[in-house]
């Protein structure tokens, strides 16, 4: 295949028109079949065309079109909130529903500021994120996102929230540094970023427990999240954990922060909450925030028209019940281990693939021109988009990623109910796509 055609980004192409999906496969109107190796954007967690979810949606839609959150609550919302709180880390006992991950981020900012106002500290208004993190496209969410490519020209509309340095073991851990030493250094960097701003003005820090789209699955060194919790406690700053990608089972636990036993002040979910069957997000909150707000200004006086709408809630409830009944998290761990083995063996065969990293069914790797030096391809090559393009032609959907400006990573994150045989098909398609990519690295 000619290099020039490899380098054409899928973004420039006319997208096919999707017709329907079944399980881990999507079909377009021309009859082409695609294996959904990225769950769309890490979203379609239970796969496509699940009859019992469609049925739950139908039943709910027939019951009522809409009810307004400031006039009624509804049974699916109550049940879903209770079940999410039961799954969440201890003391996370209150749930506010929104319609996307971005709205969850916005709500988290408002709640953080409201909480500190209620505590008599209204000057705490900044929320610090990390370089290359991503928390949404709305202006507040984008302000907290250290994602250079996504915040180019919005200048005065964005808050000038500073960002802490990125955490990326493959690129930034020092030679000979242990995992714990890197975790300590990275947490100290974040502490330094907060101190440089004056902790009296900082309301919260926000982190993805594993950086997804913005970095290509960056798993932090063990102990890092725990250290951040300590930094937050020391400096009187709230810890917001953005689990829009990692939450609802994607990493093999219900929430990735459980992996380190960390209890955040707020936990954001989206994407997998409805498995893509409805646009939805949620903010799960620690009881100490609720108690403070309840005693003062009150909780969430404003919200969105479609917050907690019965149809979205019934949909999420059906998805959650399916995940629980089928013990899907067990599948995530088993199929995740199989996928990891397969990816590592591909990396052994293709010299330009390195740093296979991930957890559960969220995996990434980097394209490098020189493994020894960990050199990245020329950003002009748009290697990650080129790979997406090649996979697409093999009937495989993957997600482009990587730290800007290199964008040299790819994400593999299939639906959580993928079978053993389907993982093998996915790996075979990846193998074919990587063979095509060899032309870019010869
Ligand atoms: N947070 C993270 C970690 C994300 O990856 C995304 C979207 O990709 C968002 C927030 C924003 O979610 P949404 O696109 O649903 O607004």
Image (spheres, grey):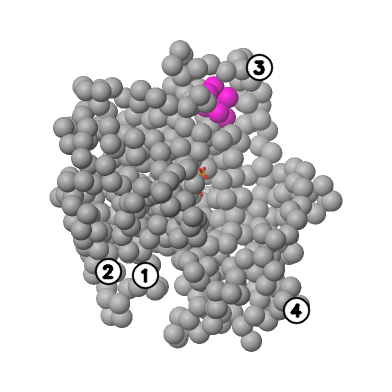
Quarter of the image for residue 114 reads top left
Report x, y in % for residue 106: 40, 38
* Residue 182, disc: 2
Q: Which residue is mark 3?
A: 62
Comes first in the chain, label 3 or label 4: 4
Is residue 162 in sight in this rendering? yes
Comes first in the chain, label 2 or label 4: 4
Above or below, comparing residue 435 to residue 40 in the picture: below
Q: CA distance from mark 3 to mark 2?
A: 54 Å
The residues colored magenta run 309-315
Q: CA distance from mark 3 to mark 1?
A: 51 Å
Q: Which residue is mark 1?
A: 169
- Disc 1 Cβ-to-ligand 1 distance below 8 Å: no
Q: Secondary structure at mark 2?
A: helix
Q: CA distance from mark 1 to mark 4?
A: 34 Å
**Residue 415 vs residue 137: left or right?**
right
**Residue 392 vs residue 237: left or right?**
right
Q: Are the two marked residues, 3 and 2, in contact with CB atoms closer than 8 angstroms?
A: no
* Residue 2, disc: 4
Report x, y in % for residue 343: 55, 69
């Amino acid at each position: 295949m000619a290099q020039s055609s490899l380098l054409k980004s899928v973004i420039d192409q006319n997208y096919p028109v999707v017709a329907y999906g079944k399980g881990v496969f999507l079909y377009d109107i021309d009859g082409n079949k695609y294996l959904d190796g990225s769950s769309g954007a890490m979203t379609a967690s239970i796969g496509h065309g699940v009859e019992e979810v469609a049925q739950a949606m139908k039943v709910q839609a027939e019951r009522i079109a809409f009810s307004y959150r400031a006039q009624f609550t509804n049974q699916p919302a109550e049940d879903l909130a209770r079940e999410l709180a039961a799954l969440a880390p201890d003391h996370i006992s209150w749930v506010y529903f929104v319609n996307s991950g971005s709205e969850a981020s916005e709500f988290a900012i408002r709640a953080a500021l409201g909480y500190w106002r209620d505590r008599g500290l209204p000057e705490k208004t900044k929320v610090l994120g990390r370089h290359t993190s991503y928390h949404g496209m709305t202006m507040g969410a984008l302000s907290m996102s250290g994602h250079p490519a996504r915040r180019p020209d919005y200048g005065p509309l964005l808050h000038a929230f500073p960002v802490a340095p990125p955490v990326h073991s493959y690129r930034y851990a020092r030679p000979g540094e242990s995992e714990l030493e890197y975790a300590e250094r990275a947490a100290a960097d974040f502490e330094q970023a907060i101190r440089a701003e004056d902790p009296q003005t900082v309301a919260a820090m926000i982190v993805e427990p594993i950086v997804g789209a913005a970095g290509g699955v960056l798993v932090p060194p063990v102990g890092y999240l725990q250290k951040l919790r300590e930094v937050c406690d020391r400096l009187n700053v709230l810890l917001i954990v953005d689990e829009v990608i990692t939450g609802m089972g994607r990493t093999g636990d219900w929430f990735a922060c459980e992996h380190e036993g960390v209890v955040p002040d707020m936990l954001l979910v989206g994407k997998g909450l409805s498995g893509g069957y409805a646009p939805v997000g949620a903010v799960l909150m620690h009881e100490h925030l609720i108690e403070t707000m309840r005693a003062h200004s009150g909780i969430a006086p404003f919200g969105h028209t479609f917050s907690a709408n019965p149809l979205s809630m019934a949909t999420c409830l059906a998805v959650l019940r399916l995940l629980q009944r089928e013990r899907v998290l067990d599948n995530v761990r088993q199929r995740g281990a199989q996928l990891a083995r397969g990816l590592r063996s591909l990396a052994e065969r293709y010299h330009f693939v390195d740093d296979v990293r991930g957890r559960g069914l969220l995996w990434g790797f980097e394209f490098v021109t020189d493994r020894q030096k960990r050199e990245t391809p020329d950003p002009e090559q748009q290697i990650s988009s080129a790979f997406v393009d090649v996979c697409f032609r093999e009937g495989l959907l993957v997600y482009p990623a990587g730290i800007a400006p290199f964008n040299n990573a790819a994400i593999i994150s299939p639906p959580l109910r993928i079978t053993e045989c389907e993982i093998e098909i996915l790996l075979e398609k990846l193998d074919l796509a990587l063979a095509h990519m060899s032309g870019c690295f010869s």
